Image (spheres, rainbow, N blue to C red):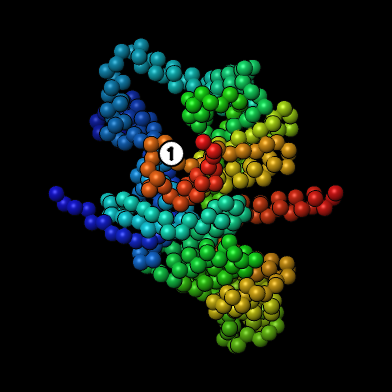
């Protein structure tokens, strides 16, 4: 009888969708094979041994075998469950944003260890950082770099002149900075302040520790978010879905805070 | 309509195609079901067709608990022997059957018809959450039991509901997380086992 070749891999579970009566298709991100889709049989049954180990946001060790169309999960064991994230609605939704971005910017079976490491480190940091917005921007810039969309931040996209510390323009269509003289050369541009450019450069260099110490004003934080969201939306040609619920929670929080202020 | 299924007569291939649309029915099973229908007496076929039409025509959502019913309000909501001060919130109508089978719960239900799933773009407005809040406003509710599924989406939904309900001054509880009967401790995952310890009790 031919034996199915099984192999062992670590993975972060990005998402799951129900399949048939009690199965699920998992989308995994693995260190050596990039994104993979795998069938986990029977995991929706209460007594499944596997179910609790392959929930989204869990970092686990899996035994997989090659199936006809998808991999098949035969065993699983949690490595890290990120319980503080799971126990907090806001953190869960924030983590889902990181996961959804990873899913959106990667293709199946293309190895990219840096992306795996970035996602794992960012999930570990998420429950600890003071300002999740900075972590998001760091994650976005690093991820874009690893998958080939690194924005050009030092030379003007058009005239190649070194960018001066004045208000410049970020072009989503060109993927980088345009100097004030060249701002008209691309169809979609947004102004970017000197401070915002500094932060973006710092995050692109990968210096999260320094960036995490920064205290950003609300305006600067919003500017950075608008620029990155615009760029990501342009690249994906769609919205990142989990931002809708994330923004709703944020809005409700402000409303609650405002209500409390009335008393 | 073109004949997708070889030389079968038009009404037969149409029936095959209708069966094929059902979940879990492939082209082969669809053909087998269609030929089965051809063989059964007309009265049985008619009763199947009538049953399908009846569920579509008579079943509505209960205006109170949003469960599927042919009587509005549904039998559970009208039952005066049940405790109307406790509401158990579930994701789907089928979950009510599971809870009812235990025979342990004597309160009322509320069906959300889904679960918050941020990555699929499904938010609170796509569920029957405003209907639940309306029931709270109507008064008389002392406890809400959150009985969503113990997975990421279910727990996110429960945490979201908890946020909405606690300021209203009702007791909000959720079903215990823990070890399944007949299971084996060594196979328990960290989250389940961790919560089982949190929820341990005097024996």
Instruction: Out of B3 and A25, give the one closest to the viewer.
Output: A25
Of all chains, the one bearing label 1 is B
Q: Is residue B1 visible in this depiction of the protein? A: no
Question: Helix, strand or loop at disc 1?
Answer: loop
**Where on the picture, by quarter, is residue A163?**
bottom right
Q: Residue pushed farthest bottom?
A: A161
**In this picture, is A109 found above or below A69?**
below
Q: How many marks?
A: 1
Question: Is residue A167 depicted above or below B50 in this figure?
Answer: below
Q: Is residue A102 left or right of residue A208?
A: left
Q: Position of residue A187 (x, y in %)?
A: 61, 70
Q: Nearer the viewer, residue A20 or B154?
A: B154
- Quarter of the rendering containing residue A19: top left
10 Å neighbourhood of mark 1: few (<14), some, or many (≥20)?
few
Residue at screen point 54% across, 38% down: B202
Q: Is residue A17 left or right of residue B104?
A: left
Q: Is residue B50 above or below residue A140?
A: above
- Furthest toward the front, the residue is B203
Q: x, y percentage for residue B144?
A: 64, 34
Q: Is residue A83 visible?
A: yes
| Residue shown at the point (71%, 52%) measured from the top left | A253
Provide the residue designation for mark 1: B180
**Residue, x 39% and y 33% (percent of image)?**
B22
Q: Nearer the viewer, residue A96 or B7?
A: A96
Q: Residue furthest right?
A: A263
Give residue A43's position: percent from left, percent from top.
Answer: 39, 44
At horizontal 54% and vertical 68% (from top left) the residue drawn is: A139
């Amino acid at each position: 009888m031919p034996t199915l070749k099984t192999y062992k891999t670590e993975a972060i579970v990005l998402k799951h969708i129900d399949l048939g009566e009690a199965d699920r298709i998992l989308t995994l991100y693995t260190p050596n094979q990039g994104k993979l889709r795998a069938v986990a049989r029977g995991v929706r049954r209460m007594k499944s041994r596997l179910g609790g180990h392959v929930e989204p946001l869990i970092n686990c060790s899996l035994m997989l075998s090659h199936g006809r169309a998808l991999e098949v999960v035969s065993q699983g064991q949690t490595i890290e469950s990120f319980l503080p994230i799971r126990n907090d609605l806001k953190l869960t939704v924030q983590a889902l944003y990181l996961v959804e971005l990873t899913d959106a910017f990667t293709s199946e079976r293309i190895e990219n260890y840096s992306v795996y490491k970035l996602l794992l480190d960012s999930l570990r940091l998420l429950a600890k950082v003071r300002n999740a917005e900075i972590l998001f921007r760091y994650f976005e810039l690093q991820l874009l770099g690893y998958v080939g969309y690194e924005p050009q931040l030092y030379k003007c996209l058009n005239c190649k002149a070194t960018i001066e510390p004045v208000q410049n323009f970020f072009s989503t269509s060109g993927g980088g900075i345009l100097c004030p003289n060249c701002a008209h050369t691309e169809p979609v541009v947004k102004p970017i302040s000197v401070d915002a450019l500094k932060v973006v450069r710092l995050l692109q260099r990968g210096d999260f520790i320094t960036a995490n110490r920064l205290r950003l004003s609300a305006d600067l934080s919003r500017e950075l978010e608008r620029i990155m969201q615009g760029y990501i939306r342009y690249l994906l040609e769609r919205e990142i879905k989990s931002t809708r619920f994330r923004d709703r929670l944020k809005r409700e929080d402000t409303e609650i805070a405002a209500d409390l202020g009335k008393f | 309509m073109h004949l997708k299924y070889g030389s079968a007569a038009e009404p037969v291939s149409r029936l095959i195609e209708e069966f094929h649309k059902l979940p879990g029915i492939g082209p082969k099973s669809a053909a087998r079901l269609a030929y089965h229908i051809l063989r059964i007496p007309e009265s049985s076929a008619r009763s199947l067709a009538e049953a399908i039409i009846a569920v579509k025509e008579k079943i509505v959502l209960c205006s109170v608990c949003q469960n599927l019913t042919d009587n509005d309000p549904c039998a559970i909501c009208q039952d005066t022997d049940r405790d109307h001060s406790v509401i158990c919130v579930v994701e789907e109508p089928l979950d009510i059957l599971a809870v009812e089978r235990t025979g342990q719960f004597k309160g009322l239900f509320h069906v959300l018809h889904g679960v918050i799933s941020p990555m699929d773009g499904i938010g609170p407005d796509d569920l029957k959450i405003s209907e639940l809040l309306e029931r709270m406003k109507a008064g008389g509710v002392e406890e809400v039991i959150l009985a969503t599924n113990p997975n990421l989406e279910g727990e996110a939904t429960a945490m979201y509901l908890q946020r909405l309900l606690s300021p209203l001054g009702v007791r909000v509880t959720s079903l215990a997380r823990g070890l399944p009967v007949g299971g084996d401790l060594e196979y328990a995952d960290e989250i389940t086992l961790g919560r089982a310890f949190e929820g341990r009790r005097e024996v």
